[in-house]
Image: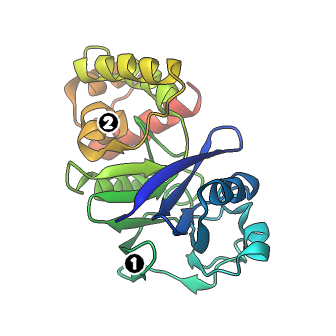
């Protein structure tokens, strides 16, 4: 058995530690110090590093961690990510004997080209593609690619726990409410998020079911969202056009 613990890092990142009582793997270590402190506090040895994509706030701590623990780094190879020792692509499987978990890999471009997700039964580590009530910016590729990647994640079982990399939920919910002001699930999630943050607790992981109920980027066919965007000048009401207009609006919200 293993646990998954959030290690806060940088301004609003979470580095996820997958661990038993002796061994740990970490996902997207943007800095090393909080990981080293966590390992020391819990008497754990680092065995692996998992990397969803190459942005600095996800890989910034890898070199320092590997100076202490010369461990494999799993992810997509890219010229701007020199740390990967074991490349993973769509359809590959990664088995970590300690702490005991098997991941299947899917490629989810659209935030950036080389983004991947780590899937295990009931679990997805999705980096910066799917957030609590939101999604990542479309830095590379096309809106269609990002939309398709999100739709792939939305097809996971409803109970799948969503481990994304940032504490963006409260801000994303403000946008979700602007898109869909009469959605009771959004209003309930806003209240729950306020309670969690007031108690200094994190809002993650969420679930695929919760995201499908409250995340506007997974709700592009909802009539209220379409009406909201039409009031902002949208004429093409196809699902991709709705998604593209909503992502552009969010960029400046």
Estimate the x, y position of residue 16 in percent, counting from the top left: 53, 55
As drawn, 230 above or below 7 = above
As drawn, 149 above or below 177 = below
Q: Is residue 57 left or right of residue 245?
A: right
Estimate the x, y position of residue 7 in percent, counting from the top left: 59, 48
| Marks 2,1: beta carbons within 8 A | no
> Would you identify the image quadrant in which residue 233 lies?
top left
Estimate the x, y position of residue 10 in percent, counting from the top left: 71, 44
Q: CA distance from mark 2 to mark 1?
A: 33 Å
Q: Nearer the viewer, residue 235 or 194?
A: 194
In this figure, what is the number of numbered marks?
A: 2
Res. 236 mark: 2
Q: Nearer the viewer, residue 175 or 50?
A: 50
Q: Nearer the viewer, residue 17 or 186?
A: 17
Estimate the x, y position of residue 226 in percent, counting from the top left: 28, 27
Q: Nearer the viewer, residue 80 or 118?
A: 118
Placement of the N terminus among the 4 image quadrants: bottom left
Residue occupying the point 48% across, 64% down: 21
Residue occupying the point 47% across, 62% down: 18
Placement of the C terminus among the 4 image quadrants: top right
As drawn, 80 above or below 130 = below
| Mark nearer the viewer, 2 or 1 | 1
Residue occupying the point 60% across, 52% down: 139
Q: Residues within 10 Å of mark 2 (few under 14, many from 20)?
A: few
Residue of label 1: 90
> Would you identify the image quadrant in which residue 74 lies?
bottom right
- Badge 2 marks a residue whose secondary structure is loop
- Badge 1 marks a residue whose secondary structure is loop
Residue 113 visible? The answer is: no
């Amino acid at each position: 058995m293993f646990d998954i613990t959030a290690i806060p890092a940088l301004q609003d990142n979470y580095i996820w530690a997958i661990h038993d009582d002796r061994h740990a793997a970490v996902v997207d270590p943007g800095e090393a110090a909080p990981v080293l402190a966590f390992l020391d506090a819990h008497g754990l040895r680092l065995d692996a590093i998992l990397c969803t994509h190459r942005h600095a706030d996800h890989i910034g701590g890898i070199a320092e961690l590997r100076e202490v623990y010369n461990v494999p780094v799993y992810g997509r190879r890219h010229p701007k990510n020199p740390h990967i020792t074991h490349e993973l692509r769509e359809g590959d499987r990664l088995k970590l004997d300690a702490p005991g978990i098997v991941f299947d890999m899917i490629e989810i471009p659209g935030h950036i080209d080389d983004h991947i997700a780590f899937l295990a039964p009931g679990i997805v580590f999705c980096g910066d593609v799917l957030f609590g009530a939101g999604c990542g910016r479309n830095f590379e590729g096309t809106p269609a690619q990002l939309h398709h990647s999100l739709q792939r994640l939305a097809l996971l079982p409803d109970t799948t726990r969503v481990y994304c990399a940032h504490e963006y939920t409260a801000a994303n919910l403000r946008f979700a409410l602007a898109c869909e002001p009469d959605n009771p699930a959004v209003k309930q999630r806003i209240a729950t998020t306020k309670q969690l943050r007031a108690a200094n607790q994190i809002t993650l992981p969420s679930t695929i079911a919760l995201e499908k109920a409250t995340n506007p980027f997974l709700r592009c066919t909802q009539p209220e969202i379409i009406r909201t965007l039409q009031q902002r000048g949208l004429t093409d009401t196809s699902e991709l056009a709705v998604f593209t207009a909503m992502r552009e609006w969010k960029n400046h919200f």
